[in-house]
C-alpha cells in the first residue's frame, strides 16, 4: 500500500529507531514541535519576559485549532485540560429548571463522566447510557436516551478504548430536538477525523493537544457556538475570561462576549507554542486526507488481526472507528512493555493493546506491530 505522506517521516526522528503507534495516548515528537520549544526557551533567555510573544503563541494556536474545525478563533477558549473544559461548561449549567439530566455513555472517557457526576450536589442527574466496545449502535442509544429533561448530552466522538465513532451530527440533532445542548469530547478525534463545527452544527467541542494533535498535555481548546456562549455564564473564571484581561479592575466582573469567557488564569504559553507548530503541520497536510489514509490503515489492521487470530475489540468496519484498533490481550500492561523492547510504542488500557497510527505510519508499521503482538502472546 502506498504511503501518501512518506516525505513527512523525516520530521519524526523516533521513526529512525522505533515504530510509534500510540497516537491515542501520545503521538511522535516532530522537528517543528522541537523547534517551537527551543524558540520559546530562546525567547525566555534573550528577552526575559515577553508577554507579546506569549500572547501571540496562544493566539496562533487558537487560530490553527479554529482552522482545523472550521470555526473562528474568537469562539475558542484555551484551558489546561479537557476535564477543565468540561468543568468550565458544567459551572455554567443549572440543573434546577426542569432539566436536571446529563446524558452520556459508559464508553466516554471516565474523567468527563466524573465532571458530570460531580454536579450531583447541584441537582444534576447523570444518565449513563450502556455502550459496548466493538458495537456500532452507540449513536442510536445516546439519541434514544435524550428527552425534555435533558440539559446536556456529552459525547465522545471517538472512544479512547476501542476507537468507535459516535455520529455527533446525529446526537446533536437529537439534543436540539429536545431543547438540550451537546458537549463533544474530541480528544480522540481532533487531528485524525475531519471536524466542521458549522456543518455538523456543534454546540460545544473540546480537545487537548497530546494525542492526534501531535503536541503535549497542558493545553486544551474549547469551542462554543457564539450564540450559546453568550447565554452561558461560567461560575469558575479568571482574568483571561474578561472582556479585557489587562483592564485590572478587581471590582468589575464582565464576561467576554464569546467562548473566551471560559478562559480562566494565565494560559499555558509554552504548550501553546507546541500546539501552534503541531497543528500547523496537520493543517498543511489536511485532516480529511489524514482521515482517509487512517481508514485504510484500519482496514489493514482489522484484516491482519483476523489472519493472526487476535481478538479485535474495535468495530470491524473501518468507517465506524477512528485510527485506534484495540486488541484484547491478557496482561496488556506487561505486553506494552515487551512491545517497547521490540521497538513498538503501543498503548495499553485495561484489557486491550491499542494500535493507534497517525499519518506518518505505514501499513508495514501496523502489520509488524500486530505480528509482534501475536508472537509475544503465544
Ligand atoms: C477521549 C478523552 N477525553 C478526555 C481525556 C482526558 O483529557 P484531560 O486529561 O485533558 O482532561 C482523554 C485522555 O486520555 C481522552 O482520551
Image: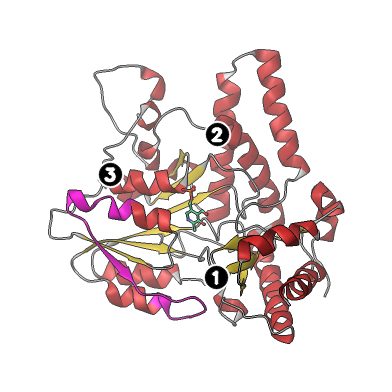
Q: Secondary structure at mark 3?
A: helix
User: Which badge, 1 or 3, comes first in the chain's sequence?
Assistant: 3
Query: Mark 2, residues whose alpha carbon is within 10 Å: few (<14), some, or many (≥20)?
Result: many
User: Which badge, 1 or 2, comes first in the chain's sequence?
Assistant: 2
The magenta region covers 115-139
Quadrant containing the N terminus in the rendered view: bottom right
User: Label 2 belongs to which residue?
Assistant: 58
User: Label 1 belongs to which residue?
Assistant: 162
Horizontal arrangement in the rendering, residue 9 relative to residue 159 (left or right): right
Q: Name the spot of residue 104 as percent of width and height, x first.
A: 34, 65
Q: Residue at x 62, y 65 (%)?
A: 332
Badge nearest the viewer, 2 or 3: 3
Q: Quadrant of residue 190 in the image?
A: bottom right
Q: Contact (CB < 8 A) between labels 1 and 3?
A: no
Q: Secondary structure at mark 1?
A: loop
User: Label 3 belongs to which residue?
Assistant: 91
Separation of residues labelled 2 and 3 (CA atoms): 24 Å
Q: Contact (CB < 8 A) between labels 1 and 2?
A: no
Tell me if I can see residue 323 in this picture. Answer: no
Q: Name the spot of residue 168 as percent of width and height, x first.
A: 43, 67
User: Which badge, 2 or 3, comes first in the chain's sequence?
Assistant: 2
Amino acid at each position: 500500500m502506498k504511503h501518501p505522506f512518506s516525505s513527512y517521516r523525516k520530521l519524526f526522528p523516533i521513526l529512525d529507531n522505533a515504530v510509534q503507534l500510540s497516537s491515542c495516548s501520545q503521538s511522535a515528537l516532530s522537528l517543528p514541535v522541537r523547534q517551537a520549544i527551543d524558540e520559546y526557551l530562546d525567547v525566555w533567555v534573550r528577552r526575559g519576559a515577553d508577554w507579546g510573544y506569549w500572547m501571540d503563541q496562544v493566539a496562533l494556536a487558537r487560530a490553527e485549532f479554529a482552522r482545523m474545525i472550521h470555526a473562528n478563533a474568537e469562539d475558542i477558549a484555551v484551558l489546561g485540560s479537557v476535564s477543565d473544559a468540561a468543568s468550565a461548561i458544567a459551572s455554567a449549567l443549572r440543573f434546577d429548571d426542569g432539566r436536571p439530566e446529563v446524558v452520556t455513555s459508559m464508553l466516554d472517557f471516565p474523567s468527563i463522566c466524573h465532571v458530570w457526576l460531580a454536579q450531583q450536589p447541584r441537582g444534576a442527574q447523570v444518565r449513563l447510557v450502556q455502550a459496548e466496545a466493538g458495537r456500532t449502535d452507540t449513536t442510536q442509544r445516546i439519541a434514544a436516551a435524550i428527552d425534555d429533561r435533558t440539559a446536556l448530552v456529552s459525547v465522545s466522538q471517538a472512544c479512547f478504548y476501542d476507537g468507535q465513532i459516535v455520529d455527533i451530527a446525529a446526537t446533536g440533532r437529537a439534543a436540539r430536538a429536545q431543547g438540550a445542548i451537546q458537549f463533544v469530547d474530541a480528544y480522540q478525534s481532533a487531528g485524525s477525523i475531519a471536524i466542521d463545527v458549522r456543518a455538523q452544527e456543534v454546540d460545544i467541542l473540546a480537545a487537548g493537544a497530546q494525542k492526534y494533535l501531535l503536541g503535549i498535555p497542558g493545553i486544551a481548546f474549547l469551542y462554543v457556538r457564539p450564540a450559546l456562549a453568550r447565554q452561558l455564564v461560567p461560575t469558575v473564571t479568571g482574568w483571561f475570561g474578561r472582556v479585557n484581561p489587562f483592564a485590572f479592575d478587581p471590582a468589575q466582573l464582565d464576561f467576554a462576549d464569546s467562548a473566551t469567557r471560559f478562559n480562566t488564569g494565565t494560559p499555558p504559553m509554552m504548550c501553546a507554542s507546541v500546539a501552534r507548530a503541531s497543528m500547523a503541520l496537520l493543517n498543511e497536510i489536511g485532516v480529511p486526507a489524514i482521515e482517509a489514509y487512517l481508514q485504510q490503515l484500519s482496514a489493514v489492521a482489522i484484516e491482519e488481526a483476523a489472519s493472526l487470530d487476535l481478538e479485535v475489540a474495535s468495530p470491524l468496519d473501518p468507517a465506524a472507528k477512528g485510527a485506534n484498533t484495540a486488541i484484547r490481550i491478557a496482561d496488556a500492561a506487561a505486553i506494552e512493555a515487551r512491545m517497547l523492547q521490540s521497538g513498538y510504542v503501543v498503548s495499553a488500557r485495561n484489557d486491550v493493546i491499542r494500535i493507534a497510527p497517525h499519518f506518518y505510519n505505514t501499513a508495514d508499521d501496523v502489520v509488524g506491530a500486530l505480528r509482534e503482538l501475536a508472537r509475544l502472546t503465544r
